[in-house]
């Protein structure tokens, strides 16, 4: 693109002609040091935002200059967009409040200062004020520095008119800074407090739900096959029984588009009915589709109420996709209230929350026909394939987030290439790992995974093979926010669908869909929504606080450069503090080394590491499972309860032996009058039982994976 740009006298951006004559000509034609037009380097979404929200504002040239400069400095797209939105919003509010007409009238020492002091818009939260100042300072500083460093004196004199004045104050000068920081910290830790310790349970529930959706899809495909084989007139009713753990019977109808119209003629026009009868236009064979109607669920135990499929209420409430379109204000209010009751969205926000909008064709949201006519059915209309895709992607994401602590952009880099996926057999042991580029780096680093993770990757690959009807999956361009420039070449990414790589906007709804209905609340009663970064915090906290892993080891696992960041991620929650205090009161004679709280110097760390003679190594067999750390053993081989271990059902007997042994040791140490050793024996038994519970969940969902529902057809 660079050669083409240099050869042209104007930018080749598709937005150029929409901007020319409406913004400053020299800003529009600004070039970098290689003589490439900066406009041609800016992400399309940023220019689209500018056209929709900033073009007619008095500060349009200031914003366009900043977008060009930020992209030249390789600032991530999502960071630019967030700052664009933050600064643009506050400027519009301040200009309206003070009735300002142009940028020259805007005095940061007066107008912005009064805002930060809370004299205008007192309803704004401390966090919003802090974010507004932070974004504005970043914008003003980066523009001034770039102009000074890259332009001639003459050019600097010209572009000075498009630079925002840097504020003479910082957020630390205002009380809101401390309030906002403390509130964010409290919110993060109170949410982590609920999640920490529940990671195995979340994984197990994800598997249970995927298994249920797999049974639904298998039954749906059998029904489609039966309908085509027997040429039965639709709708065709079918049902099947769930496994004993669920204990319910599900009932469905199979439809296609023409049959649905013909059985609901009172809701359709005469022309639509005729097209359905002739099977022409949108009802032709090529445009037709099968979908199902979930009628009811019956409990096999007559005394209990059936729960049904966990996700049907999302469609019954009509909040999948961009739900706020084409409905009344009263209906919008009703649906917003329901979403807010589950913790989706902010109470005072003017934006309608869309927690189940993947913004990716074929994932989660139903087809247009099914979505439009949902309210015409007796039961719940379901488009099966988008649900299956969302659950399959969501389960793989959940597994990786909770076993590796990876970030979402690192997840999206997974590709079916030899450079990314590594499976090595050594000493009769198979080692699994994937190599991606961590945040803030430019080279790949290793992330160690389990065999289960790779089985889930294989499951995603199989789904994509069926989706594309090919043995290979296509190479697509990476679309993760802020990292596109790092991966310019198309690759066969695992997270792709309909010929496009997924973005974080597709991963979030898939994860929410898979885990919806698992009601979790903070101690204050605030509902918690599972977020990718929250899982990362929980992973770190569990590893350090309950798994007793060294901060240095966890930093390596999380690919942090700064131990301070890891320390923040892994700070003890209130529940963990309560547990530790209880243990202290229970065994008051225990010795607590306060000096361990002090961060060690590199020399001390090196000395400590030398003390550990044995290295566990990736996937060595340990008591009750396999070790997944590639470092020196973080807890000196005390494998029970360690977060670096993944329990395995095949080693269940080892944990049962530990429980028997702990009972014997407890009795023996009691007789010897050794209370501390008695406590250790009890803790050993407690940790073994905890891991046995996790193994029991794994055994159940593995068993259910082989369960094949017996589909019955009512013709």
Image (spheres, helix red, strand yellow):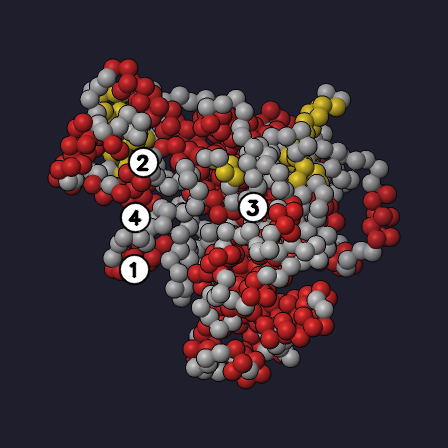
Q: Determine crowd level at label 2: few under 14, some 14-19, many 20+ residues with C-alpha closer than 10 A.
A: many
Q: Earlier in the sequence, mark 4 or mark 1?
A: 4
Provide residue 379's location: percent of width, then percent of height. Answer: 24, 38
User: Which circle's residue, 1 or 3, is located before the other in the chain?
Assistant: 1
Between discs 3 and 2, the one toward the N terminus: 2
Judge depth for marks 1 and 3 and give the one in front: 3
Front-most of residues 9 and 307: 9
Tell whether label 4 touches label 2 (CB within 8 Å). no
**Is residue 480 at all visible to an observer of this figure?**
yes
N-term mark: 4 or 3: 4
Q: Which residue is mark 3?
A: 480
Q: Which residue is mark 1?
A: 333
Pick whichever, 251 or 490, lies toward us: 490
Which numbered marker is on residue 382?
A: 2
Quadrant that contains the C terminus: top left
Q: In front: 502, or 426?
A: 502
Q: Residues within 10 Å of mark 4 (few under 14, many from 20)?
A: few
Q: Which residue is mark 4?
A: 317
- The mark that comes first in sequence, 2 or 1, is 1
Q: Residue at x 52, y 22 (%)?
A: 471
- Residue 586 visible at all: no
Q: Secondary structure at mark 1?
A: helix
| Occupied quadrant, residue 456 | top right
Residue 364 screen position, x and y as percent: 40, 40
Against 476, residue 714 (above or below) is: above
Marks 4 and 3 sit apart, C-alpha to C-alpha, by 31 Å
- Secondary element at image label 3: loop
Q: Residue at x 24, y 41 (%)?
A: 373
Residue 19 at x, y percent in the picture: 49, 61
Label 3 CA crowd tier, 10 Å (few <14, some 14–19, many 20+):
many
Query: Label 4 vs label 1: CA separation?
Result: 12 Å
């Amino acid at each position: 693109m660079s050669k083409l740009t240099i050869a042209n006298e104007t930018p080749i951006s598709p937005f150029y002609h929409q901007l020319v004559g409406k913004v400053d000509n020299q800003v529009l034609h600004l070039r970098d040091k290689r003589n490439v037009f900066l406009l041609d380097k800016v992400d399309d979404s940023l220019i689209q935002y500018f056209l929709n929200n900033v073009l007619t504002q008095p500060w349009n040239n200031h914003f366009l200059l900043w977008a060009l400069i930020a992209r030249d400095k390789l600032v991530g797209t999502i960071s630019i967009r967030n700052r664009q939105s933050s600064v643009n919003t506050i400027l519009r509010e301040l200009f309206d409040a003070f009735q300002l007409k142009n940028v020259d009238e805007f005095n940061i020492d007066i107008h912005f200062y009064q805002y930060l002091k809370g004299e205008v818009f007192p309803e704004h939260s401390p966090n919003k004020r802090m974010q507004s100042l932070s974004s504005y300072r970043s914008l003003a500083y980066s523009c001034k520095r770039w102009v000074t460093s890259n332009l001639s004196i003459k050019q600097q004199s010209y572009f000075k008119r498009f630079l925002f004045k840097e504020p003479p104050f910082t957020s630390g000068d205002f009380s809101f800074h401390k309030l906002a920081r403390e509130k964010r910290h409290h919110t993060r830790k109170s949410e982590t407090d609920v999640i920490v310790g529940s990671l195995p349970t979340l994984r197990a529930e994800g598997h249970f739900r995927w298994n249920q959706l797999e049974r639904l899809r298998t039954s749906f495909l059998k029904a489609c096959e039966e309908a085509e084989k027997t040429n039965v007139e639709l709708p065709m009713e079918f049902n099947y029984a769930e496994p004993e753990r669920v204990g319910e019977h599900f009932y469905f109808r199979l439809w296609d588009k023409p049959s649905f119209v013909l059985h609901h003629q009172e809701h359709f026009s005469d022309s639509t009915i005729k097209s359905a009868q002739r099977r022409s236009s949108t009802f032709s064979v090529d445009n037709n589709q099968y979908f199902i109607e979930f009628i009811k669920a019956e409990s096999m135990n007559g005394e209990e109420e059936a729960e049904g499929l966990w996700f049907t209420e999302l469609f019954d409430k009509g909040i999948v996709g961009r739900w706020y379109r084409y409905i009344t204000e009263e209906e919008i209010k009703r649906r917003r209230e329901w979403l807010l009751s589950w913790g989706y969205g902010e109470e005072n926000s003017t934006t309608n929350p869309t927690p189940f909008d993947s913004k990716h064709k074929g994932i989660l949201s139903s087809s247009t026909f099914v979505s439009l006519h949902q309210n015409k059915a007796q039961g719940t209309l379901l488009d099966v394939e988008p649900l299956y895709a969302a659950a399959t992607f969501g389960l793989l994401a959940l597994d990786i987030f909770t076993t590796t602590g990876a970030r979402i952009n690192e997840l999206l880099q997974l590709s079916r290439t030899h450079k990314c996926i590594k499976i090595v057999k050594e000493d009769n042991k198979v080692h699994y790992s994937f190599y991606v580029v961590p945040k803030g780096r430019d080279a790949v680093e290793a992330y160690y995974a389990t065999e289960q993770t790779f089985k889930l990757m294989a499951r995603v690959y199989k789904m994509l093979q069926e989706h594309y009807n090919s043995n290979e999956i296509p190479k697509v361009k990476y679309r993760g926010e802020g990292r596109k420039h790092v991966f310019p070449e198309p690759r066969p990414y695992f997270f792709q669908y309909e010929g496009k790589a997924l973005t974080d906007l597709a991963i979030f709804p898939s994860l929410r869909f898979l885990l919806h209905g698992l009601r979790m609340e903070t101690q204050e009663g605030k509902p918690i929504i599972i977020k990718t970064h929250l899982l990362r915090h929980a992973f770190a906290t569990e590893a350090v606080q309950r798994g007793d892993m060294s901060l240095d080891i966890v930093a390596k696992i999380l690919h942090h450069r700064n131990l301070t960041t890891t320390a923040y991620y892994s700070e003890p929650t209130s529940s963990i503090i309560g547990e530790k205090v209880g243990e202290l009161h229970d065994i008051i004679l225990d010795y607590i080394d306060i000096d361990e709280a002090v961060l060690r110097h590199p020399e001390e760390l090196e000395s400590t590491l030398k003390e550990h003679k044995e290295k566990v190594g990736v996937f060595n067999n340990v008591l009750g499972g396999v070790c997944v750390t590639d470092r020196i053993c973080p807890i000196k081989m005390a494998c029970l309860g360690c977060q670096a271990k993944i329990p395995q059902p095949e080693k269940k007997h080892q944990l049962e032996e530990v429980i028997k042994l702990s009972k014997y040791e407890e009795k023996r140490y009691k007789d010897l009058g050794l209370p501390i050793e008695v406590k250790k024996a009890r803790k050993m038994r407690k940790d073994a039982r905890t891991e046995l519970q996790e193994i029991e969940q794994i055994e159940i969902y593995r068993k259910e994976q082989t369960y094949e529902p017996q589909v019955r057809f009512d013709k």
